Amino acid sequence: MSSFILRRLLAVIPTFFVVSLTVFLLIHLVPGDPIDSLMRAGSSPALREQMAAKYGLDRSLFEQYIIWMGKVLTLDFGTSIIQGRPVAALIAQNLPSSLTLGGTAFLFSSLAGIAAGVLAAKYYGTRIDSSITSGILLGSTIPSFWLALLLILVFAVWLGWVPVSGARGWSSLVLPVIATGLGGVALVARVTKVSMIEIGRQDFVTLLRAKGVSESRIRLQHILRHALVPVISILGLRIGWILGGAITVEVVFARPGLGSLLIRALNQRDYPLVQGCLLMLSMAVILGTIIGDIAQAAMDPRQREASK
Amino acid sequence: MLNQIRHSADHDAILSVENLSIDIESKRGVLHVVRGVSFHVNAGDRIGVVGESGCGKSTLALAIMRLLAPGAAPVGGSIQFLGTDLLALSETEMRRLRGNEIGMVFQDPAASLNPMMTAGRQVGETIEAHKGVSRKISASAAVDMMRSVKIPEPAVRAGQYPHQFSGGMRQRIVIAMGTANTPKLIIADEPTTALDVTVQAQVIELLEKMNTDTGSSIVFISHNIALVSEFCSRVVVMYAGRIVEEGSTSDIFSRPYHPYTSALIKSVPPLDERLADGLVPIEGRPPNLASKQVGCAFAARCSSKIEKCTQSSPPLVAMGPRKVACWVTGAHS
């Protein structure tokens, strides 16, 4: 098992370089640059060149990448051009708020999704199933920022149960969590349901019935355990989205967080900050996937065997 | 005068199936897979049920367990187990019987085990489900059970997963699971089909031992009439959902009455392969089960058929200690 984990971690290295290159090129190939945001109208071209030289923007793209990468490898993400503060500090400041929202939303999608999937599978073909299934369809098609606006209108403006925006206290977390997590609930519920139904048809389930094992035990201890294998790999992909999935929702609710930070940095073409945020988000996705793989391997004895 | 058999309730009967019919709803219409089957199993009996695939033997087994797939249901007749009508029991009452009083051993041990649970837990689960014992007690009982089905080093093997066992060992686990509570009746549905011949013999030996040690009655379902002849004292031959012949193994093997039984015996290699002197396949196919049967279901494939065979269906009638359903070789002739 440990060599399996090691191999997975080693595979991150090439992925990391590809991702970093993509992140770097993505922002540099977009028109506009951070100097535009810094210069006042009417500044001389000489001053402009001086500024560009200060941030190393006058060098070739290749050189810029090498310099950036060299620093990143020593965990120095550079300094924000616009805000003048270290990128690492800005990320660290905004990370807890994003983690809280993303983590809670992740938990919400896992638990509610699995519960909904188990119920839909148990009552397969009945009205309970069809109402859950329509809920799933709705949940997976509504964009989260629009859902966020709708939720604000109903629960914050009309009913006044929770604050409209901000990040003060747990009550302000409710709507963002629902808006961020509902898509995940739908996805997890769908995978859980399909996988429960499919596994419920396997021969070993008939044999469990022949042993006189109770239906609820068959469903929860045997079928669900199997059904969770694909669910876990889906959840692994979503662990990565803990940080990245809430970007638009953070903006709608005016919450501090990586999303708000990234959107602002993008508008200002703040290269070091955008690169830092994007690299962070991509690494989160990669690590999340690995955690998912490991969890999946730990659950299935056959995979545990094969991955020794 | 036809010597029509009327079954009377037998005091020793563990299982009495009376005139049981089972239909399966399919997209192409209703299939009558079991058509008026009656047979009895007495205490300590070893009964073989043989026939080609699709003759209804596995459906019969699942019907006794009340585990028919959705769409399949008994449409007539009764199944009495120790005097209780199984078809009238509630699902909870039925669950208490399964694995406890009636054990089932399935074919294909690879698919019958939960790949994500240790062998010991899966055997122990049968005990836990009925005896209300703690997990610790059921775990040690499971090891004992695995020892009794001759799994070497049972304490170690109990902690292993199904994929770590060979096919023969897996079938032993399946047998241990089905019989952990010493049921009065064991239904073994093709328990050796997925195994090679030497392992087959070991599994048969194991079932034999179980039958003599605990007195459990065994219904042994197989397409292999040679294997059935090794193991069973009585044989029920099924064709197209009906019983066509029934009697003691020695009678049926030495002198099969029904042409289908003879054909079946000739078409299967004997366990001792040196005796195989050319197998004779049965020409043609079993009839479509969706149609209403006019005449004998085997008539189309039968070499000794007479005109009557295609006109009306021969009833199962007694000929001494045996029963046969044939216009030509049966009691009518």
Image (cartoon, coloured by chain):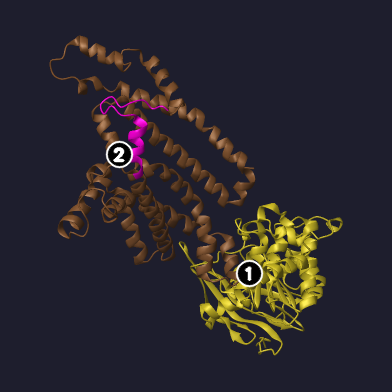
Chain colours: A brown, B yellow
Residue B45 visible (yes or no)? yes
Q: Look at mark 2 in the image and give the residue it sits on.
A: A259
Between residues B125 and A58, which one lies in front from this camera angle?
A58
Identity, as a three-letter code, of the amino acid under mark 2: Gly
Q: Residue at label 1?
A: B135
Q: Chain of mark 2?
A: A
Name the residue furthest right: B274
In this orientation, which residue lies closer to the viewer: B22 or A227? A227
Q: Residue at x 19, y 55 (%)?
A: A156
Q: State how far apart marks 2 and 1 are (Cα).
A: 50 Å
From this viewpoint, is residue B238 visible?
A: no
Give the magenta range.
A76-96
Q: Is residue B332 left or right of residue B93?
A: right
- Tally of numbered tags: 2
Q: Is residue B254 magenta?
A: no
Q: Name which residue lies at 74% across and 58% down.
A: B156
